[in-house]
Amino acid sequence: MMQGIIDLHHDIFFFLILILVFVSRMLVRSLWHFNEQTNPIPQRIVHGTTIEIIRTIFPSVILLFIAIASFALLYSMDGVLVDPAITIKAIGHQWRASTQPFEYSDYNSSDEQSLTFDSYTIPEDDPELGQSRLLEVDNRVVVPAKTHLRMIVTPADVPHSWVVPSSGVKCDDVPGRSNLTSISVQREGVYYGQCSEIRGTNHAFTPIVVEAVTLKDYADWVSNQLILQTN
């Protein structure tokens, strides 16, 4: 998903550069040729059919190419994987601004309970060295890198929005239904996000932290979480 956003940005930027060069050239040319010294008696042009056709067709073609690429990306972002490797569920709460429950439904503990945990915000007066203020949590959402995941988001009360900008993920939580989105983090590392749906008091204190690790480290993390949940 993120790669598609980057590719679309590069494609649009290519057209922007062409437009910038063309407009700049025409502006400089006009300033150079059409001035009082070189052309003391200005020409009066009433009609320019050819120019009018060109300046109508070319922008339309450029906008058409941009629209096709944009709609293709939009519909691909709305698609859901048929057989994802992992399914993660996030539940939004209005009055639990400092925490967000997560559920890994593919893994069950010895008592047949799905792997679940709460992700609490680290208070701004208690961060460790290197932690981001009001963006760090005690339990990160750990995922394996280069793996296709399915993310299910649902609110317990009011609308929310699960957003990790650096991964190209934004999925709105609508009361009464569950929304799906697909994630595939290509690089190992830590990715930060926040709820982007204004929903009242303490809205700004709902960070989201996704940590992408190797498949081996992910398996070890799942095992440790299941042991902690059982105990």
Image (tube, grey):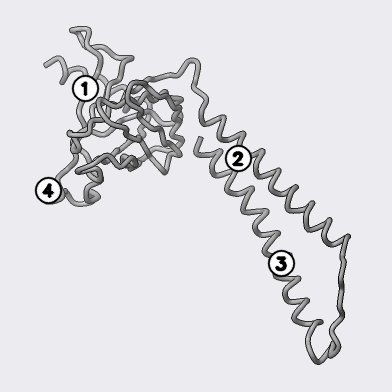
Dot 3 amino acid type: Val
Mark 2 and mark 1: span between their CA atoms?
Answer: 40 Å
Q: Are marks 2 and 4 in contact (CB under 8 Å)?
A: no
Q: Secondary structure at mark 4?
A: loop
Mark 3 and mark 2: span between their CA atoms?
Answer: 24 Å
Task: Write down the residue under mark 2.
Answer: 70
The residue at 74%/49% (across/down) is 60
Q: Secondary structure at mark 3?
A: helix
In the image shown, does 231 or 103 lie closer to the viewer? 103
The residue at 55%/34% (across/down) is 74
Q: Quadrant of the C terminus?
A: top left
CA neighbours of label 2 inside 10 A, class few (<14), some (14 to 19), many (20+): some
The residue at 51%/35% (across/down) is 1
Of mark 3 and mark 2, the one earlier in the sequence is: 3
Q: Are marks 1 and 4 in contact (CB under 8 Å)?
A: no
Task: Write down the residue under mark 4.
Answer: 126
Comparing marks 1 and 4, which lies closer to the viewer? Answer: 4
Task: Write down the residue under mark 1.
Answer: 225
Comparing marks 3 and 4, which lies closer to the viewer? Answer: 3
Task: Write down the residue under mark 3.
Answer: 23
Mark 3 and mark 4: span between their CA atoms?
Answer: 54 Å
Mark 3 and mark 1: span between their CA atoms?
Answer: 59 Å
Of mark 2 and mark 1, the one earlier in the sequence is: 2
